[in-house]
Amino acid sequence: MMVTPEQHYEFLKQHYRASRFEERNNSSWGTAYSQHIADYRYEELQTVGYSLISSHESATGDAIIYDAELNKLDTIPGEKKSYTTQEHISND
């Protein structure tokens, strides 16, 4: 079952670095910056069934892949293996 946009926003608020989410709600980035991010990611959930928070944006520094029920996933759906950034760079 798909979460509500409000539940999704709270999930993002919890897992994004504040400096990459609500702290950007200002005249430089736009007063509704975090809402635009949440809307875009919510649309991804609706169309492809998952979304992600990059390691650069994540509060923990680890990328977070999650599904429409806000379950954290180990890999992107359909991928055979999850790569660390360094593994991905060295394999390209």
Image: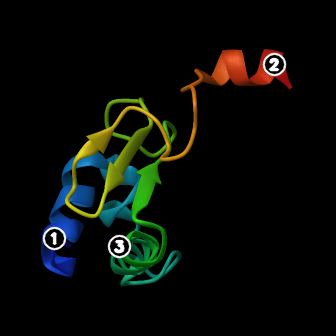
Q: Is there a contact, CB below 8 Å, between mark 3 and mark 1?
A: no
Q: Quadrant of residue 90?
A: top right
Between the residue at mark 3 and the residue at mark 1, the CA separation in whole angstroms equals 18 Å
Please report the residue visible at 46 percent of the width from the left and 35 percent of the height from the top. Answer: 75
Give x and y (percent) for residue 29: 51, 75
Q: Label 2 amino acid?
A: Asn
Give x and y (percent) for residue 3: 16, 71
Residue hosting label 3:
38
Q: Nearer the viewer, mark 3 or mark 1?
A: 1
Between the residue at mark 2 and the residue at mark 3, the CA separation in whole angstroms equals 32 Å
Residue hosting label 2:
91
Give x and y (percent) for residue 85: 64, 24
* The C terminus lies in quadrant: top right
User: Which disc number belongs to residue 1?
Assistant: 1
Q: Check disc 1: other Cα within 10 Å, few if <14, some if 14-19, many if 20+.
A: few
Q: Label 3 amino acid?
A: Ala
Q: Label 1 amino acid?
A: Met
